[in-house]
Image (spheres, helix red, strand yellow):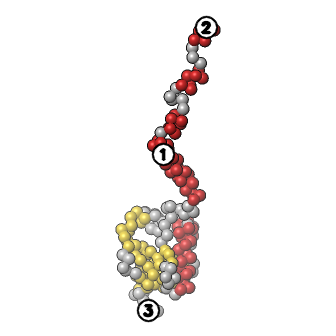
Amino acid sequence: MSAVAGALPSVAGLIRASPRAHPFRRLLRRRGAAAGLAVIVFFVAIAVLAPVVSPYDPLATSWSAVRKSDGMVVMAIWAKSVQSRDGGCGCLLWAPNGAGARPWSDTPAGRERREHCKLALEHGCAEGLLVHGESLEGRLPEDRARTVLGIDPKTTITFKVELRGNEYWARWGTTP
């Protein structure tokens, strides 16, 4: 039995000699393959570290901003939410999330909108751009829109922000 065992190659020798035993070493010997592996590892690392590297939610949409040149608050207003009343126009800009009816108000974008409403109230006015599109059924357009057909950047609305109870409203087109 010992003569047969001596004639057979050792298992360790077979593993070392096998080209499949160390594919990683073979990969590293090929420059193109090693570069491809480095690119893949780089993109996987970015994907894994994305929540740490970027503090912004990729799905959050900001519908207002402050113009740097003059401090004017500029808001996107959904055209379908504009109401005619008392010879003028207006729309609800922000309202609290009472009884879960406006969950968007509690999101970072909703809190940002509330802060911009406060700034516009202090400033005396704000500017708005009309957004044309369709909201998803049962959702506010600020939260999730089915489609955004566009905004006409040449048409701006100058409006006053009014605080009605705990809601912020835009009002334009009438003289007080």
Q: Nearer the viewer, mark 3 or mark 2?
A: 2
Q: Is residue 43 above or below residue 27?
A: below
Residue found at the very far right of the displayed protein: 2
| Residue 70 visible in this rendered orientation of the protein | yes
Q: Residue at x 49, y 82 (%)?
A: 69
Query: What secondary structure is marked by label 2?
Result: helix
Q: Is residue 6 above or below residue 144?
A: above
Left or right of residue 137, residue 16 in this image: right
* Residue 153: percent from left, percent from top: 38, 77
Q: Residue at x 57, y 14 (%)?
A: 8
Query: What secondary structure is marked by label 1?
Result: helix
Looking at the rendered structure, the kind of residue marked 1 is Ala
| Residue 73 visible in this rendered orientation of the protein | no
Residue hosting label 3 = 175
Label located before the other in sequence (2 or 1): 2
Looking at the rendered structure, the kind of residue marked 3 is Thr
Q: Is residue 165 above or below residue 57?
A: below
Residue hosting label 1 = 35
* Residue 11: percent from left, percent from top: 59, 20
Residue 71 numbered tag: none
Q: Of 76 and 174, which appears nearest the observer? A: 76
Query: What secondary structure is marked by label 3?
Result: loop
